[in-house]
Amino acid sequence: LDTTKAGAVIIDRKHSKPAMPVIRVDDPYVSALQTVKIFYPEAEPRLVGIHPSAVIAKSAKLGKEVGIGAGAVIEENAVLGDRVSIGPNAVIEKDVVIGDDSRIHANVTIRHHCKVGKRVIIHPGAVIGAEGFGFAPTEGRFEKIPQVGIVVIEDDADIGANTCIDRAFLGATRIGRGVKLDNLIQIAHNVEVDDHTVIAAQTGISGSTRIGKGVMMGGQVGITGHIEISDGVKIGAQSGVTKGFPPGATIFGYPARPIMETKRIEACLVRLPELLKRVAELEQALKRAKEDIQGD
Amino acid sequence: LDTTKAGAVIIDRKHSKPAMPVIRVDDPYVSALQTVKIFYPEAEPRLVGIHPSAVIAKSAKLGKEVGIGAGAVIEENAVLGDRVSIGPNAVIEKDVVIGDDSRIHANVTIRHHCKVGKRVIIHPGAVIGAEGFGFAPTEGRFEKIPQVGIVVIEDDADIGANTCIDRAFLGATRIGRGVKLDNLIQIAHNVEVDDHTVIAAQTGISGSTRIGKGVMMGGQVGITGHIEISDGVKIGAQSGVTKGFPPGATIFGYPARPIMETKRIEACLVRLPELLKRVAELEQALKRAKEDIQGD
Amino acid sequence: LDTTKAGAVIIDRKHSKPAMPVIRVDDPYVSALQTVKIFYPEAEPRLVGIHPSAVIAKSAKLGKEVGIGAGAVIEENAVLGDRVSIGPNAVIEKDVVIGDDSRIHANVTIRHHCKVGKRVIIHPGAVIGAEGFGFAPTEGRFEKIPQVGIVVIEDDADIGANTCIDRAFLGATRIGRGVKLDNLIQIAHNVEVDDHTVIAAQTGISGSTRIGKGVMMGGQVGITGHIEISDGVKIGAQSGVTKGFPPGATIFGYPARPIMETKRIEACLVRLPELLKRVAELEQALKRAKEDIQGD
């Protein structure tokens, strides 16, 4: 602090007050990040007005101050809440409902009947509500099972670019409140991701799996179908998860195990070539010892 | 069955007839799934009519009852069969051919000269026929090799959302009849996927690899280039496949091995820390034994 | 060569001249690939003219001979260099700058303020400049941190289909000159990929990591955040990289290690079940030996 050229600093409330202008807060890291909102108030301005090239069905219902970009398509009976923003060339299919203040970016596709909450952000290229991967094996080929459910995305969720969330077979694939999904994620049919869970890029979750609240996953994780991940579980990047773990567990690896177990195994793996040598030496030594004894 | 409130049930033909209305079938699971088609006949209705905002080249040839969504682009000499449906804002480039009853969803891109069979479904955001990843190393940089082949997708295939199938360097990247590809899959140039193979999400297949008939792959599998996967091979999720295996083999792991071998190794891995300790104890015991003998 | 029906062949300059027309070169493989350019000069012709359905803001600046496809959207103050080609339904947001001879394919999204160099190719469905995945944990939920930086893609880069490159939190996410990114790749905020690096499909690079020059990565690699990969490092497919390695190192595995180390461990893994048996036998033998000695 003695050498900074800054005019003011954000410091932890617990620190003593230095001889310069300060803002004392509980969490300086978070507060520093939040100042970005002050310096860049218009970082992501809402779209204003409806572009004449947008194609909007007569039966669609638009709230107040809705913004719709060029070439966007809003199909029959879609309902857009107040201040909703639909990016250029996005496609909102029939009977979709989008809550107030949500922002759908360019080239997104939201398929028919899906429901999006308030203040949701869906980044470019994401596909919401494509048919789930459901096929019944029939005489050496696979017959499509119609996927007649929907996707429900709750308030304050954030869906990354080119991420795919499939519609349910029956019922709904559900993304809970405040869930943050990074880019290129795959959420299969009938998955439920509970509130405030955060998932990094390129992770895939197989059908009918239920992810608890406040779960954190690294990137490129794979989770098998029909299992339940407890609240607060943390999963390391690239893990392959095939079963549940207790709430709050930190797991990692392929297959995923409690992280300390995986770390212990990894530490041993490096010693494996040496271990093989030592066992061979033991065998030789024992053989010689036997010969010595028999030679006695 | 004694307690169900259902008005009728679907049961295995082999079971004795209970005291309520039943439909007796060979495979109750498959038949139950198929009833969805009866209860939701219009789950995925075809697009009807050509939206005035669609841009269709004069030289394009359209079959009977073709449906084209708002903002879709059909370029020169494209040929669409009867009852083909092209979703909003999809782009069908020049000289593409699409067979009868195929359905191309919103925001799909099919690049020039690619061929799509009959009854094919391509989900939103998929990219068919992007240039393959071909570069020749030249003086410390990489020079692009034009990719002048195409993609051929045969009848009844199903291509997932945001999946990418690259055009061939020469010839064709081929997706066989009835192949089911899930979302976010990467199929590189000159790959061949033979009939009725099923591949789960986020799997990637490297250039010139040939996948046999009736192969089943889990999600996030990676397959190296220029190899051949035999008919009927089953590959577990997240496996890394670097060589071929006999027809019908079930393989798993990184690197992929016959599944029983991988399971055996995994079971041993958990015991590795204990094994290291046991070997150290053996060494100590042998040392003491030697000292005892020498001490005699 | 004695049996070929070819009218002429390309051979290594070092070989003696056979009795037929030849072209003698330094690298026959590269030269053979390059002949494709001669036989297919129009493999990827530029778009010519501006389609009347394209939506171009009045404040956008277009260079000479720019081609813009049907339904493409060019927002306020965007600048397109000479001979730039924008595919159908692509979206170029406000204040984007694209250099001469670059080619942006169908359904691409380039978000506001991003900069693209000369002769860059961006394949269909790619998303450039989506907001990075930045959230501050606050009272059991996650608060969005505005991402106010940009993406800079330098000359001669090639960006694969449906690949995502996130904008920086502050500053720029940078893709260097001649970098080749395959399909479905995730580049997180503030990553830097230096010149002439080549990355295969479905690889993901976490935030603020710096990749050196001339690095080569296989597909489905995952790289942790805030690390530095040295120049010329080669990374095998599906590796999980959690730390740096010296320039030119070849690394592989999960976690990534020098390739010879990983191969050595893999070779030992196969012998692990047998090793456990041998150790149990040693323990038995030692126990018997002790009994024998005590029995003496």
Image (tube, coloured by chain):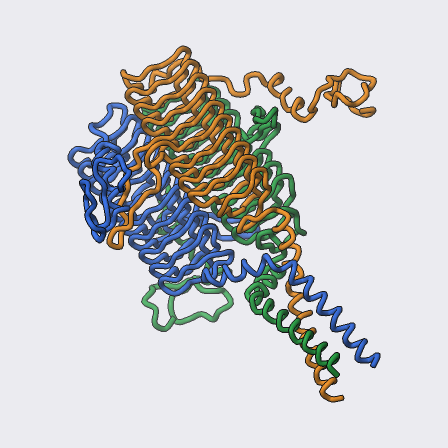
Chain colours: A blue, B green, C orange
Instruction: State the image quarter where residue C34 is shown.
Output: top right
Q: Which residue is nearer to you in this view: C289 or C133?
A: C289
List the single residue furthest toward the bottom.
C295
Residue C185 pos. (x, y %): 46, 38
Residue A225 pos. (x, y %): 44, 56
List the single residue furthest toward the left.
A64
Residue A253 seen by the camera: yes
Instruction: Describe residue B2's horizontal placement relative to residue C182 as left or right.
Output: left
Which quadrant holds the C terminus of chain A? bottom right
Vertical arrangement, residue C54 with respect to residue B251, above or below: above
Q: Which residue is nearer to you in this view: C165 or B61?
A: C165
Instruction: Describe residue B169's horizontal placement relative to residue A164 as left or right.
Output: right
Q: Which residue is nearer to you in this view: A74 or B204?
A: B204
Give the residue at x 57% y 69%. B274
Q: Which residue is nearer to you in this view: C242 or C12?
A: C242
Number of numbered discs: 0
Which quadrant holds the N terminus of chain A? top left
Vertical arrangement, residue B121 with respect to residue C11, above or below: below
Residue A109 pos. (x, y %): 35, 37
Residue A16 pos. (x, y %): 21, 50
Instruction: Describe residue B252's horizontal placement relative to residue B119 as left or right.
Output: right
